[in-house]
Amino acid sequence: MRPNPLTGRDLAAALAVVVVWGVNFVVMKFALRDFTPFQLGTARYVFAVLPLVLFIRPPNIAWKWLVFYGLFQGVGQFGILFMALKVGMTAALASVLLQTQVFFTALFGFVLLRERASRPLQAGMVLAALGLSCFALNYITPGSGVASATTLAGFVLTLGAASMWAMSNIVARHVQQSGVPYSPLAFVVWSGIFAILPFAALSYVFDPEAVRWQWTGARASSWLAVAYLGWVATLLGYSLWTGLLKRHPANRVAPFSLGVPVVGLATGMLVLGEAITPWQWAGIALLVAALVCVMLGGLLKPR
């Protein structure tokens, strides 16, 4: 049987996800003006959980998977990403570097699940390694003042965030392999509960006392940014994306994610005036080529 074709509604949903997730990085920058990374993580998941947790039943899966997903995808991915954006990473480059989660997922899948890497994936990982080398060379021989917009710490932390996203993908695979039907929206909402308390605890322990309560004086625009991150980027974005994956094969849906770094780059440069060095452009080109190789490589196999 031939797979169902993508309808106009499906294409609209995919485009909405690309725009929502691409703009997401600039919105994070705005929110970090008035929130520390840990405060922003707490607020994001409070908005993502409330009020839906009062109306949606928990998914019929083992609680440990909700805990692991909340810790890896919430505290791990976004906590580290918020720190990266704070200490030295542009929204534009973060949108590209975070896509290395594809390759971290493959690496963790091989180590933890004994999954073999396909030829396109192997080629993509080589291209990705070359791309990351270009980003690293940017800090060795920057050659331009705009390199100061990012730091080596921000670069390393963004890759750490991508690796945490990959670990959350491994958790999601375990849940899917269990064969138990569940609501993706319920999974996102209830796993978010387990990100709130760790974020709040990290804020209490590591945020200086002078800024511990600065969120109470946050501007209305920063609160709107938090609402966007919690309700639009998290709930709407993940719900639309998982809906597409339930109706169509992953290899037909995944290529749309290539649009996320394009939107992220454009909004970072246009809205925030972020600049990109030649080394970074080279790294971006290689990473995008790697993603294209992985996501479209399977479609080019001879039949």
Image (cartoon, rainbow, N blue to C red):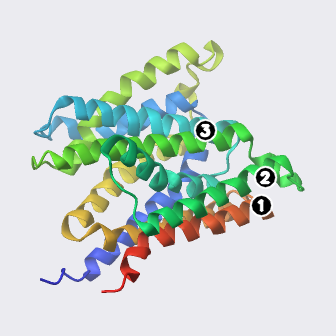
Local crowd size for mark 3, using a 10 Å CA cut-off: few (<14), some (14–19), many (≥20): many
Q: Which mark is residue 157?
A: 3
> What residue sits right under mark 1 in the picture?
279
Q: 69 and 53: which one is in front?
A: 69
In the drawing, does residue 46 fall left or right of residue 147? Answer: left
Please report the residue visible at 22 percent of the width from the left and 49 percent of the height from the top. Answer: 185
Residue marked by disc 2: 137
Q: Amino acid at mark 2?
A: Leu
The picture quadrant where one finds residue 188 is top left
Seen at 55% across and 46% down, the residue is 28
Query: What x and y, as percent, mark residue 227?
Result: 42, 45
The residue tagged with tag 1: helix, strand or loop?
A: helix
**Of the residues shown, which amino acid type is indicated by label 1?**
Trp
Query: 107 or 131: nearer the eye?
Result: 107
Under circle 2, the secondary element is helix
N-terminal-most mark, 3 or 2: 2
- Say if 275 sits above or below 155 in the image: below
Q: Amino acid at mark 3?
A: Leu
Q: Position of residue 289 (x, y in %)?
A: 57, 71
